[in-house]
Image: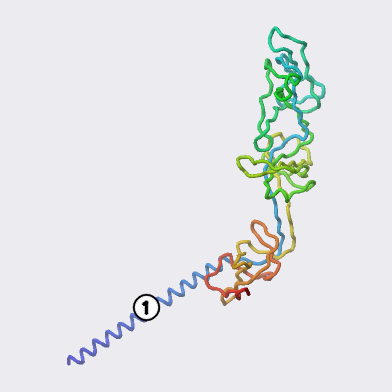
Amino acid sequence: MRSEMGGLTRARIVAISLAALAAGGVFTYRFYKKRQLERVQLDISALVKVERGTLENKFQENGDIWPRKLLNIFPNVSGRVVELPVGDGQSVKAGQTLAVVQGGRTSAEKFLPATIGAPITGALMRCPEEGGRNGGGTKEFVKLDDFVTGRNDSQQNATCMMAIADLSSLIVKLTINEVDVLKFRENMPVTVTVDALPGETFPGTVTVISRQAEEGYRRAGKVFRTEIALNRRDERLRVGMTGRVTAMIAKKENVLKMSLGAFFEQEGRSVAYLNVPRDKPREVEIKPGMRTPLEVEIVSGLKEGEQVFTEKPVDFVPLPKAPR
């Protein structure tokens, strides 16, 4: 009787164990399938297509709008400003009186008054200072009763009273870092946009590229001063406005391209991971061409319409080892 009960108990233990193993197997299989499905879904979300289109490499930098012709006004004699019939921002004509300086350093030392006239027709503005980002700041516009130093007394320390600008011809002054300066050339066409005039573009031309580097603004490295001539006049443009200069450095049409995110460097070779339907992804060697911040040209190694991964797959068919 005990033997039969013992046999029955062992049979139940075996049955329970087998059931537990079966349940564990089912759980393991379901977990594996779930992870496999999640991986497939992840891989599919990381797929991009190889397609034909246009690649454009553009350069963009900000500068300041400035008059092409700007003359600083200095007195010839030292003395006190006794007449000032003009003000900052006023338009004047060539020959018009800008100021009268009473020569002499003291009230007892008085010479004949010196009249200062406008050398050209233009708009009056503050004298620019050297330094700063794209031409520096500005000095104060001269005021009535100010004492000014004339160029006859000091060429280096003469007082810049005001400046006169010909606003019929404007430029954009900017600095270009040494990495990008060789991408530019004189007479290169560019476009300029202005924050104050949204939606409008102004055609421009590169007219000046400095041959000498200088230290950039706020430790920006070595830079080169550059000037862009604005080819369209607009009375709404003002000196000092920000001009955003865009230049087309390179352009290719009807080329095979893909997302730069699908481009990998592996052991000194350029590769992509090709999606193979119902099989493992395959590592393929490609020859890249022109690149932009977002895309890369495919010279060889892939075909139009194929799909590649922007994330390196966990499991794939690798390329054969490169011969040493």
Q: Quadrant of the N terminus?
A: bottom left
Q: Position of residue 247 (x, y in %)?
A: 73, 49
Q: Nearer the viewer, residue 159 or 275?
A: 159
Q: Position of residue 117 (x, y in %)?
A: 79, 21
Q: Quadrant of residue 230?
A: top right
Residue shown at 70% from the left, 60% from the top = 290
Q: From the image, tell me which residue sits under label 1.
A: 24
Q: Nearer the viewer, residue 187 or 308?
A: 187
Q: Nearer the viewer, residue 25 or 211?
A: 211
Q: Position of residue 175 (x, y in %)?
A: 69, 42
Q: Is 288 situated left or right of 310 in this image?
A: right
Secondary structure category for the residue under label 1: helix
Residue shown at 65% from the left, 35% from the top = 132
Furthest toward the right, the residue is 95
Q: Amino acid at mark 1?
A: Gly
Q: Nearer the viewer, residue 299 or 45?
A: 299
Q: Is 222 situated left or right of 111 in this image?
A: left
Residue shown at 20% from the left, 89% from the top = 5
Q: Position of residue 185 (x, y in %)?
A: 77, 48
Q: Is 141 situated left or right of 13 in this image?
A: right
- State whether residue 12 is above or below residue 244: below
Few, some or many residues within 10 Å of mark 1 (<14, 14–19, 20+): few
Q: Quadrant of residue 269?
A: bottom right
- State whether residue 197 is above or below residue 311: above
Q: Quadrant of residue 292?
A: bottom right
